[in-house]
Amino acid sequence: MAEVVVRNLVKTYAASAHRATDDVSLEVADGEFVVLVGPSGCGKTTLLRMVAGLETPDSGTVHIGGRDVTGLPARQRRVSMVFQSYAIFPHMRVRQNIGFGLAMRKVDRQELERRVQRAAELLQLEDYLDRFPAQLSGGQRQRVAVARAIVVDADVLLMDEPLSNLDALLRLQFRTELKKLVRQLGTTTLYVTHDQAEAMSLGDRVAVMRDGRIAQIGTPLAVYDRPDEQFVGGFLGAPPMNFFPAQVRLRGADPQLVVGEDTWPAPAHLKAYADRSVLVGVRAENIQVTADPPAAGPGAQPGWSAAVVEVVEPTGAAVLLTVRLDTHQLKVQAPPGFPARPDDTVWLRSAPEMLRFFDPETSLALVTT
């Protein structure tokens, strides 16, 4: 078993009183792929380096495979690491770069060649084994770095933003290859990125970090759909979740949201927050939009609001609108070819079950069940 268990890790750098990691606990199951994601300075790389043995925690413990490795150097932890920079030797051929770690461990030459060949096949590098790094593209160099990490058969694979130096197309291609590779290997993997698209697409679970702590951890879709706090909803998603204030009012026994001068239907469980202000969160793709005034009268859908278009951004698969609702700016996803121009009026509505609610003071999700 190669599970990783981190308990109450604290790390403060001498140059700052700010904690890089603030009492962080995390469990990564054997064979699981967990992604640490967050803005720069949130502590994700520091946490990864403490698991690797490249940083020493002020307090807390790190266990790998049931073994306390907190005080062990990196070479005794049975982990391998891929860094943001390729960190491959320019004077060595690809074959030598991949097998470097094995050579340092004085692995039998025949076994070394067998492992190098296997790693090269997995990373589609068979035709490049006798080339030097200068003769490779950026994506191929990154493959060499990953091959060197997996060839040692470590218990845990640690990756620190390995795709950040690639252009957008290469990053997308390599992301697909990397997910397939990790599934084939079944290696416990802890991956750091600031790119939320990588986090959502790669991880079995995603841990969103902020200010040295884990704000939320869960499956990508669960974290995306039901953020525990406003920060998580605002960080994950392109565009991020929209937020705007509203008042909860009861109409008979039914709760409603008062948004500016309009009234929106609210889910029944929001009744507990009657006569209170709430922060409403909604994803751009969960907002209905129409260019024509909605029908009125019996049977009409309630909760439509007029908004003014400020910016129109065609993306091919959709049209992203920036609109002004009352005094609040929202992002709305419309279908391709949606007839809207700046200063046009459009009408918005969201189904009650698509809305998320947060406390305006703490920014934490409201308990609504």
Image (spheres, rainbow, N blue to C red):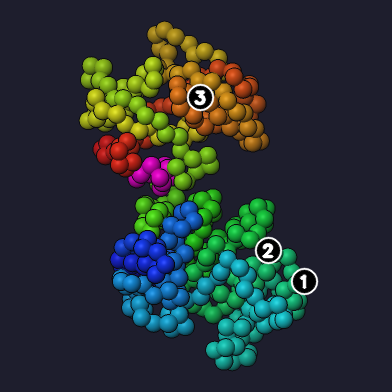
**Residue 183 at x, y percent in the picture:** 52, 64
Q: Secondary structure at mark 1?
A: helix
- Determine if the magenta segment contains residue 133: no
| Front position in the image: 201 or 311 | 311
Q: Is residue 232 above or below residue 35?
A: above
What residue is disc 2 on? 139
| Front position in the image: 36 or 359 | 359
Which residue shows up at 65% across the image and 52% down it? 168
> In this view, which residue lies farthest toward the top?
297
- Please tell me whether mark 1 or mark 3 is closer to you in this view: 3
Q: Secondary structure at mark 2?
A: helix
Which residue shows up at 75% across the image and 72% down it? 134
Asked if residue 246 lies left or right of residue 158, the reply is: left
Is residue 256 something one can see in this rendering? Answer: yes
Distance of mark 1 from mark 3, alpha carbons? Answer: 52 Å
What residue is disc 3 on? 324
Which residue shows up at 47% across the image and 64% down it? 45
Magenta span: chief secondary structure: helix
Asked if residue 150 lies left or right of residue 26, the reply is: right
**Residue 237 at x, y percent in the picture:** 50, 43
Lower sequence index among marks 2 and 3: 2
Q: Is residue 41 above or below residue 9?
A: above
Lower sequence index among marks 1 and 3: 1
* Span colored in magenta: 223-233
**Residue 135 badge:** 1
Asked if residue 361 lies left or right of residue 30, the reply is: left
Q: Residues within 10 Å of mark 1 (few under 14, many from 20)?
A: few
Q: Is residue 217 above or below residue 155?
A: above
Residue type indicated by callout 3: Arg
